[in-house]
């Protein structure tokens, strides 16, 4: 999807082909986002589907209004944001299953400390065949299944409320000490972080973490450009020694150096250190995104 939007922007800026505004791929075709999700949407709807309000605003302002075709913009908005009831029910069931499995997994991790192997490099592992491994793989499987369906009008590849819930669980139910509990590290790295929920975030969310969630929220509030970088400083130990890693392309789970979660303050990817901050900053970003979404909402007064 990112490639599709990039091609569209290039054509627009070069005044080559404004018709791409209305284009959608053939029914069975799709483009693949860096997250692995498949998309078959018009550019405006693609931006709305991943909560990229900056991109959505640009498309609406510089294409629809310039072409004096506000009605087309409104139709695309309504098609994406107000899908049929049947589709809404299917989407809700999908995310409810994942949310319920998140609860199950958190309970198992907290109850089965003996299933988790602590390592001196702050990278915990799970015993083969253990209950924790079974529930973790099940959770990953449900997340991975979101890539199987092609995202068409009315569908979404990611629900930020799932990440918000995971951060809530982390901050309330898990412990933070000088010698970090391996259960906390496991939940941070493999449930929330690069090997878990954050792996499936749309790219603009990863970029928001890179720029800092609160900073990004203020930029969006004031219609300023957000950070679009995906390269992070990874803190590996208590001495805050860091190295640089790019979030994309996604690496296989378990690859050395990619055991981390994205921290909300300053956009750092953390390996051996868990941040208590995060939930409130994500809530703030989501609130601004929702506000900007409402500002794009169709105004039908021009219709007779």
Image (cartoon, helix red, strand yellow):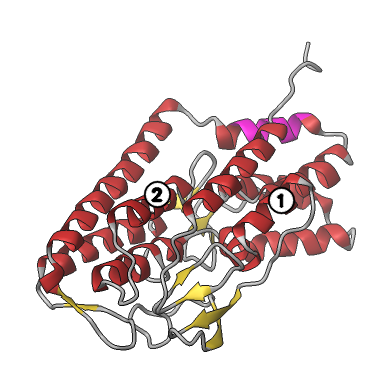
Q: Is residue 63 left or right of residue 271?
A: right
- Residue 170 is situated, as x and y percent measured from the top left of the image, at 34, 57
What mark, if any, has residue 218 been given in the picture? 1
Position of the C terminus, as image quadrant, is top right
Position of the N terminus, as image quadrant, is bottom right
Q: Residue furthest front?
A: 178
Give the main secondary structure of the magenta stretch: helix
Give the labeled residue for mark 2: 162
Q: Residue at x 35, y 77 (%)?
A: 253
Which residues are drawn in magenta?
A: 71-78
Q: Is residue 62 left or right of residue 273?
A: right
Q: Residue furthest top?
A: 304
Q: Is residue 117 left or right of residue 259?
A: left
- Measure how far apart labels 1 and 2 are at the Cα level: 23 Å
- Asked whether 150 or 233 is in front, the reply is 233
Q: Residue at x 52, y 38 (%)?
A: 154
Closer to the chain start, of discs 1 and 2, is 2
- Residue 5 is situated, as x and y percent measured from the top left of the image, at 69, 59
Magenta span includes 164: no
Q: Residue at x 49, y 46 (%)?
A: 156
Magenta span includes 75: yes
Circle 2 sits in a helix, a strand or a loop, which is it?
A: helix
- Asked whether 100 or 218 is in front, the reply is 218
* Mark 1–mark 2 CB contact (< 8 Å): no
- Residue 279 is situated, as x and y percent measured from the top left of the image, at 47, 52
Q: Nearer the viewer, mark 1 or mark 2?
A: 1
Q: Is residue 216 left or right of residue 263?
A: right
- Residue 303 is situated, as x and y percent measured from the top left of the image, at 77, 16
Labels in figure, total: 2
Circle 1 sits in a helix, a strand or a loop, which is it?
A: helix
């Amino acid at each position: 999807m990112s490639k599709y939007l990039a091609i569209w922007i290039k054509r627009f800026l070069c005044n080559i082909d404004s018709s791409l505004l209305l284009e959608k791929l053939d029914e069975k075709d799709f483009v693949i986002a860096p997250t692995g999700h498949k998309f078959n949407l018009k550019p405006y709807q693609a931006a709305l589907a991943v909560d990229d309000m900056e991109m959505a605003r640009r498309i609406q302002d510089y294409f629809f209004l310039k072409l004096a075709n506000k009605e087309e913009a409104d139709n695309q908005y309504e098609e994406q944001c107000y899908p049929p009831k049947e589709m809404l029910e299917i989407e809700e069931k999908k995310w409810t299953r994942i949310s319920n499995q998140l609860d199950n997994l958190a309970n198992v991790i907290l109850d089965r400390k003996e299933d988790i192997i602590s390592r001196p490099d702050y990278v915990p592992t799970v015993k083969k065949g253990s209950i924790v491994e079974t529930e973790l793989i099940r959770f990953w499987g449900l997340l991975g299944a979101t890539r199987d369906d092609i995202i068409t009008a009315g569908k979404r590849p990611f629900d930020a409320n799932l990440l918000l819930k995971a951060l809530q669980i982390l901050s309330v139910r898990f412990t933070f000490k000088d010698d970090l509990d391996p259960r906390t590290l496991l939940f941070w790295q493999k449930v929330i972080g690069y090997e878990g929920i954050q792996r499936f975030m749309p790219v603009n969310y990863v970029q928001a973490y890179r720029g800092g969630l609160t900073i990004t929220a203020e930029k969006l509030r004031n219609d300023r450009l957000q950070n679009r970088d995906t390269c992070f400083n990874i803190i590996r130990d208590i001495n805050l020694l860091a190295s640089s890693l790019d979030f994309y392309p996604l690496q296989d789970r378990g690859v050395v150096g990619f055991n981390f979660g994205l921290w909300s303050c300053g956009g750092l990817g953390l390996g051996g250190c868990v941040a208590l901050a995060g939930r409130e900053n994500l809530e703030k970003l989501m609130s601004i995104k929702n506000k900007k979404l409402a500002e794009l909402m169709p105004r039908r007064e021009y219709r007779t």
